[in-house]
Amino acid sequence: MKIMKNNAYNMMQGAVVLSVAALVAKILSATYRIPLENLVGNEGFYVYQQIYPLYGIGMTFALSGFPIFISKIIAEQESKEQKLAISKQLFLILAFFSVLIFGGLQLSASFLATLMGDKQLDALIKSVAWMFLLMPFLSVSRGYYQGNLQMVPTAISQVLEQIVRVFVIIMVAIMAVTYHWSVYKMGTLAMTSSFLGGLAAVIYLGKFFMQLNKPKIKSVVKYRILIQRLLTEGMMLCFFVSLMILMQLIDSFTIKNGLQSYGLSETVAKNLKGTYDRAQPLVQLGLVIGVSFASSLLPSLTQALEQNKQHDFKQKAKMVMKVSLGIGSAATIGMVALMPQINHLLFGSRALSEVIAIYVLSVIFMTIINTYSSMLQSLKEFKVLLWALFIGLVSKYCLNVIGLHFLGIIAASEATVLSLFFAVIYLMKASSIAVKDLIGEERFLSKLIISCGLMFVVTKMMANIIEMVINPGRLQSGVVLLLAIPIGAGVFVYMALKLKIFTPLEISNMPGGKKILKIVNNL
């Protein structure tokens, strides 16, 4: 009994450590792109963002997808020898696939660049391909530690990888500006950061690889079964975690070509794509805000499922959904209201603010999808997730191809939001978890819409009034944000408390929630 309690405690502590590390890594991954765009401009940012999804897929596989899958297999083994033996098997399988991916990208770089509508991108594709060789090292070591409830090595390696990568990218951007490199040379060297960051993480995790030759047992599970599980359960998990990045990859293959078919020149199409890509770091930051408020609740959700407490699982699942959707929606609508000022302050102009604002709405739907994904993976409803993934990606591709030709760049943002909306509708209809079990019967959605709507109106009005008083400029946009954000946040908090969107228990489980309750009670 005591061992079970210790395991549950270690699992919860480990989940918290991994959640914090993942948040730090995501914040680093989102924020570096702001100075990068300022340094290299729209065209330079276009070049980098065209190939970034390839890195993003590889990173997601090595950072969260495969490690989670491998940790489950490791946890199924009884002895340390079995765990090490199956780790070695998994390493050999992943090494084989990694070499295939690396070789495939190297040989098809020119073909892929042509499909993207820009042959000069082939050097960047070859550069990013090197990181896939590190995937077996990163995935298996992280999965092994997580399977043994040792989350600290994984957490430190994640943050270290991002720090090294971001440092290299910013240094390359500074040198590119100083020495007047072409945007393609800058992009090629910037993409080496993915390999160098991964290499730093592998060196840190190096102690694990010294153990792989120790076990006397050669194999625990037949290779055929492991490969089958890897290609079904493992790949599905990886692709679903990579949903937003896969949509960015579709953008890489369709936007520039679509804009040229719309009637724009190649130079204008590149610049528009680079400006459109400003939405990516904003979406990442929006997701971080939504997920961070729910991350403290996820360990208790996992514990409830492990202990087979179905009622507790439903109650905590409802809490996770309400908190993440509530805070994620508020952050998203706040960004939409202040998008011209945010765009101006961070990137130096207000170009495509409407297009970026529409794209940012995807945060709301991704928050729902991520929460559903966590729960359905726990319940092993993989087919539902696979169909939702298929619906989202096919919808995105078709809407992009048709919409860009007739409507221009705004169609890409609309396609992203609509395709995620279709995926959410399918998840709600097809999963065994009823929607009412997740958002409650207390008119949660209508209350949330009223609160976000009032916040949007007040925030927008305040921003416009302040801009009538001060001259519009980049620094002045920062002043507007400093004044308008607290007012908007205050309106949402007031309405959330007034309409009782969250229960006292849900508020107390948020980071800083107990202090909020104390202030409210005093008032």
Image (spheres, grey):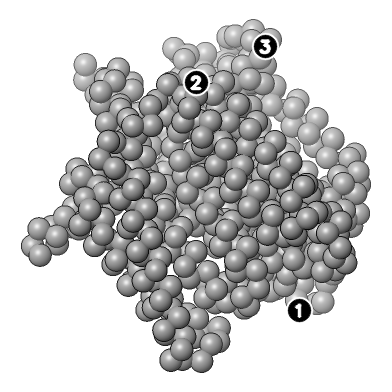
Name the kind of residue labelled 2 in the image: Glu
The answer to whether residue 64 is left or right of residue 446 is right
Q: Where is residue 188 shown, x and y percent of the image?
A: 80, 58
Q: Which mark is residue 178?
A: 1
**For the residue labelled by badge 2, is the local secondary structure a helix, a strand or a loop?**
loop
The answer to whether residue 97 is left or right of residue 434 is right
- Do we see residue 327 in this rendering? no
Name the kind of residue labelled 3 in the image: Tyr
Which class describes the residues within 10 Å of circle 2: few (<14), some (14-19), or many (20+)? some
Q: Earlier in the sequence, mark 2 or mark 1?
A: 1
What is the distance, in whole Å, between disc 2 and disc 1 at their CAs?
Answer: 53 Å
Residue appearing at x 30%, y 27% in the figure: 314
404 vs 3: above or below = below
Q: Tell us which disc is closer to us: 2 or 1.
A: 2
Determine which residue is flagged by label 3: 223
Residue appearing at x 69%, y 53% in the figure: 412
363 vs 297: above or below = below
What is the distance, in whole Å, between disc 2 and disc 3 at their CAs?
Answer: 24 Å
Q: Where is residue 103 shown, x and y percent of the image?
A: 84, 35
Q: Earlier in the sequence, mark 3 or mark 1?
A: 1
Determine which residue is flagged by label 2: 381
Q: Residue furthest left?
A: 522
- Find out whether the residues at labels 2 and 1 contact each other: C-beta distance under 8 Å: no
Residue appearing at x 39%, y 25% in the figure: 433
Name the kind of residue labelled 1 in the image: Thr
What is the distance, in whole Å, between disc 3 and disc 1 at their CAs?
Answer: 52 Å
**For the residue labelled by badge 3, is the local secondary structure a helix, a strand or a loop?**
helix
Q: Where is residue 414 shown, x and y percent of the image?
A: 63, 52
